[in-house]
């Protein structure tokens, strides 16, 4: 058993302050305490913390992570349930990528308009759907 600070570097790579958040949301069980009052975690807890960290890195919300964890421990689950949840997240990420790509295109249009002496109000940026179209 080790405390979260010991686990955080490098094994779990999970910041100590995040363990309280995950516990608050019911993603990890309350940890045993050392004589000094430190929370103590076993290997299964550390594996669960690593899974939570990786799921957060790809943008799963804490409730979604809770769903994934409950499916992991449910012998009646089907792979379709897990695939549905992850496919939904993939679709959300792809939609966000499209939105960001659009923002990048509009920012590039603005950058082209700002070259030389042209003022933003005189370029096609506003007519191209840019958010700064009212400049003059």
Image: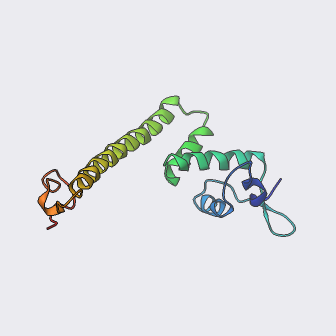
Image coords of residue 16 (percent x, y): 69, 61
Nearer to me, 46 or 129: 129
Q: Residue at x 41, y 40 (%)?
A: 88
Q: Residue at x 48, y 33 (%)?
A: 83
Image coords of residue 28 (percent x, y): 66, 54
Up/down of 33 relative to 113, above or below: below
Q: Residue at x 56, y 39 (%)?
A: 71
Nearer to me, 128 or 7: 128
Nearer to me, 1 or 119: 119
The quadrant in which the C terminus is found is bottom left
Q: Is residue 136 left or right of residue 96?
A: left
Q: Farthest residue in the bottom direction?
A: 36
Q: Residue at x 78, y 57 (%)?
A: 6
Nearer to me, 118 or 94: 118
Q: Is residue 21 left or right of residue 99?
A: right
Image coords of residue 30 (percent x, y): 71, 59
Way the structure is coloured: rainbow
Q: Farthest residue in the front direction?
A: 116
């Amino acid at each position: 058993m080790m405390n979260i600070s010991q686990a955080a570097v490098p094994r779990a790579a999970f910041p100590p302050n995040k363990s309280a958040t995950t516990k608050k949301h019911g993603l990890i069980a309350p940890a045993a305490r050392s004589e000094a009052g430190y929370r103590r975690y076993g290997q299964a807890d550390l594996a669960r913390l690593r899974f939570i960290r990786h799921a957060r890195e790809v943008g799963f919300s804490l409730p979604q992570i809770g769903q994934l964890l409950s499916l992991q421990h449910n012998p009646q689950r089907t792979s379709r349930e897990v695939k549905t949840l992850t496919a939904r997240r993939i679709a959300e990420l792809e939609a966000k990528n499209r939105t960001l790509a659009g923002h990048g295109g509009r920012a590039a249009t603005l950058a082209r308009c700002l070259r030389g002496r042209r003022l933003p109000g005189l370029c096609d940026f506003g007519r191209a759907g840019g958010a700064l179209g009212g400049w003059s």
